[in-house]
């Protein structure tokens, strides 16, 4: 364990490499930081000057790609947008909880993305395609505005107790994207989408716990989109059973 310099920041990282066996352990590093230093900057300083074996993900460094989502001082955060000056001079960094660890702060997101694919995250038009662009009115676009800001960081997925206890549950991120395309005025397969979401491990396994909303680093509200989908699914079910409502 590295001794802490009184002028530095103590950054403690959960270390684990399943290939080597053994138990996870904490390792503390001392790094210098200014008011503009992010947690990701600090991890790079450790990698470059103290321990080249430290593993973590990153890409855009602009809070757009979601790659550097981690559990920092007890909260889901993006390392690239989390300033050390915001979280204090003693920082503990874990990988996203409840996901298989590949190495150190890198988790296996295979199942997360497989569930994303299940909801068909793309527009499926049933009308003839226009010659140029498909025009949407401001009102039509407003229905999907916030949902398009999801960066697929998996923070909501990691935070969801329904995911922890039901490994087949689609999870809040996939359901948010299901809403995004179900609500799109250009899409024409709403009932097909709801058929997939209505399965045992779909929409109704969400128990509205709101962990996903609290965990989202982009301040989205996945629970609100899921509730909207539930209302839509109920209305469509009634239409199918009661012809005069169609």
Image (cartoon, rainbow, N blue to C red):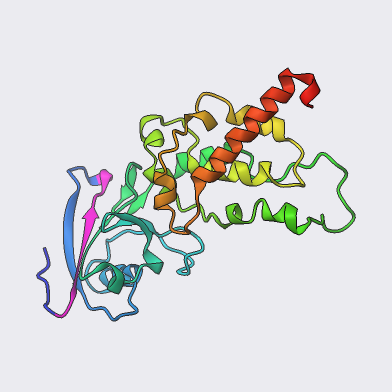
Please identify the quadrant where the C terminus is shown.
top right
Q: Residue furthest right?
A: 131
Compared with residue 1, is residue 96 higher up or lower down, i.e. above or below?
above
Residue 182: give x, y in percent of width and height.
Answer: 67, 41
Residue 42: give x, y in percent of width and height.
Answer: 29, 71
Q: Residue furthest top?
A: 241
Residue 171: give x, y in percent of width and height.
Answer: 48, 38
Q: Nearer the viewer, residue 79 or 138?
A: 138
Write the residue at 86% across / 48% down.
129
Write the residue at 41% across / 36% down.
163
Residue 41: give x, y in percent of width and height.
Answer: 34, 72
Would you say residue 157 is visible in this rendering? yes
In the drawing, does residue 174 fall left or right of residue 209?
A: right
Q: Residue furthest front?
A: 244
Residue stretch rendered in magenta on the structure: 7-19
Q: Is residue 118 magenta?
A: no
Compared with residue 199, is residue 184 higher up or lower down, i.e. above or below?
below
Q: Nearer the viewer, residue 140 or 16?
A: 140
Image quarter of residue 12: bottom left
């Amino acid at each position: 364990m590295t001794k802490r310099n009184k002028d530095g920041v103590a950054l403690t990282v959960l270390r684990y490499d399943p290939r080597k066996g053994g138990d996870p352990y904490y390792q503390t590093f001392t790094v210098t930081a200014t008011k503009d230093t992010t947690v990701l900057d600090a991890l790079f300083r450790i990698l470059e000057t103290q321990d080249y074996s430290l593993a973590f993900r990153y890409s855009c460094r602009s809070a757009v790609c979601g790659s550097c989502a981690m559990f920092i001082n007890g909260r889901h955060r993006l390392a690239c947008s989390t300033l050390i000056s915001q979280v204090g001079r003693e920082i503990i960094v874990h990988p996203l909880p409840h996901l298989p660890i590949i190495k150190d702060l890198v988790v296996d997101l295979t199942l997360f993305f497989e569930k994303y694919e299940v909801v068909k995250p793309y527009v499926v038009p049933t009308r003839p395609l226009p010659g140029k662009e498909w025009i949407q009115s401001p009102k039509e676009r407003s229905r999907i505005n916030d949902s398009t800001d999801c960066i697929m960081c998996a923070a909501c997925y990691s935070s969801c107790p329904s995911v922890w206890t039901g490994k087949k549950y689609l999870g809040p991120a996939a359901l948010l994207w299901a809403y995004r395309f179900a609500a799109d005025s250009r899409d024409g397969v709403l009932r097909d989408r709801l058929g997939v979401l209505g399965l045992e491990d779909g929409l109704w396994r969400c128990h509205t716990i709101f962990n996903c909303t609290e965990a989202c680093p982009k301040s989205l509200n996945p629970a609100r989109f899921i509730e909207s989908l539930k209302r839509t699914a109920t209305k469509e079910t009634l239409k199918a059973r009661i012809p005069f409502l169609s």
